[in-house]
Amino acid sequence: MAIIRVAMQSDLTGIIKLFKELRPHDPDVSHDALMSGWKVIEHDENNHLMVAELDGEIASTCQLAIVPTLTNGVRPFAVIEHVITGALFRRRGLSEKVIEAAVELAWQQGCYKVMLLSGETRTAAHGVYEKVGFISGTERGFVIKNPHLDKN
């Protein structure tokens, strides 16, 4: 049975392994850079990496960012990104479980909505998001990427 929880520093190796499956062309980063990035996330009460641990391995993850705002009764909104389940662990509902945990954490923090972006052609993933309760077609997402960085 999978354990769904907020990530700990000891989970980083497994999380990075999953991210390499999701984004194989991302540049490798030094251990120091990784630890620096982890410390920012770990100490930010509005940023959470959720994981599914199965048989001692990190099998699935997603990242939840809670954004304070002055609208909607000064209630924050949330964004979920980087949803990935390792190839060996797919078709077990683990992505759904980490997303559900992230959404529940957002509700506990008083968020009025949770947004999730997904690649246009990732139709299998879209089915997972809809199964969890996300609805497409109610708002429209737009993305601009930094032209000064790699095109990944």
Image (cartoon, rainbow, N blue to C red):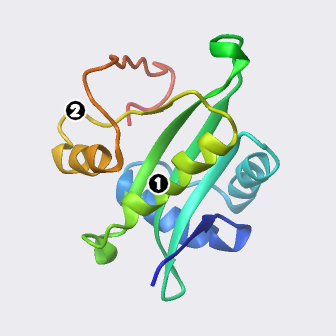
What is the secondary structure assignment of the residue under circle 1? helix
Residue 149 spot, x, y in % from top left: 50, 28
Amino acid type at circle 1 is: Glu
Residue placed furthest toward the right = 43
- At x 74%, y 58%, the residue is 35
Assess disc 2: are there few (<14), some (14-19) or many (≥20) residues with their C-alpha within 10 Å of its C-alpha: few
Assess disc 1: are there few (<14), some (14-19) or many (≥20) residues with their C-alpha within 10 Å of its C-alpha: some
Along the horizontal axis of the image, is 125 left or right of 1? left
**Up/down of 27 relative to 148, above or below:** below
How far apart are the two marked residues, 1 and 2, measured between alpha carbons?
Answer: 22 Å
The residue tagged 2 is 120
- At x 36%, y 20%, the residue is 141
What is the secondary structure assignment of the residue under circle 2? loop
Along the horizontal axis of the image, is 84 left or right of 104? left
Amino acid type at circle 2 is: Glu
Question: Could one spot residue 24 in this view of the protein?
Answer: no
The residue tagged 1 is 100
**Up/down of 110 relative to 33, above or below:** above
Q: Depth check: give the residue in front, 150 or 112.
A: 112
Residue 9 spot, x, y in % from top left: 72, 67
- At x 42%, y 17%, the residue is 144
Q: Depth check: give the residue in front, 124 or 19.
A: 124
Q: Sequence order check: which comes first, mark 1 or mark 2? A: 1
Figure quadrant of the N terminus: bottom left
**Up/down of 138 relative to 124, above or below:** above
Q: Classify residue 65 by image quadrant.
A: top right
Question: Could one spot residue 3 in this view of the protein?
Answer: yes
- At x 34%, y 17%, the residue is 139
Q: Are marks 1 and 2 in contact (CB under 8 Å)?
A: no
Figure quadrant of the C terminus: top left
Q: Classify residue 142 by image quadrant.
A: top left
Disc ID at residue 1: none
